[in-house]
Image (cartoon, helix red, strand yellow):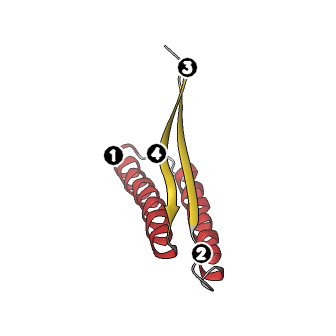
Amino acid sequence: MKNNTEFKLIDGVFSIEDADRVLTTLINYKIDYHNREDFSNHIRFNKDIEHSKKRIQELIETKDQIKSIINNSKLGDPKFIIKGNITIELE
């Protein structure tokens, strides 16, 4: 069995509206995931949630950067080529 496996999560050409929708939805899902996990771990196990708080802030900053790129690209009819791979590594 290979130690690394890679999957295509996103691979396509998108309109500005679709690119905004796909990327925003993906990042919002990750933010929601961290928020739910934080709440659950804090309530059930009184675990430290600083790592997730930091990750949420990074995701928010990424979302802001993506929004800026999209907003700055609204002149004309640009197409966005988006490629996103997921790599799973086994230790």
Q: Cα distance, mark 2 to mark 3?
A: 38 Å
Farthest residue to the top: give it.
1
Of 69 and 79, nearer the camera is 79
Looking at the image, is mark 2 or mark 4 nearer the viewer?
2
The mark that comes first in sequence, 4 or 3, is: 3
Q: Which residue is mark 4?
A: 47
Q: In the structure shown, which secondary structural element does the residue marked by tag 3 occupy?
A: loop
Give the image location of residue 46, x and y in percent: 42, 47
At horizontal 55% and vertical 19% (from top left) the residue drawn is 3
Does residue 42 appear to the left or right of 48 in the view shown? left
Earlier residue among tags 2 and 4: 4
The residue identified by callout 1 is 44
Mark sitting earlier along the chain (3/1): 3
Q: Locate residue 71, reporting x and y percent.
A: 60, 81
Q: Tags 1 and 4 in contact by the CB under 8 Å rule?
A: no
Query: Mark 3 = which residue?
Result: 3
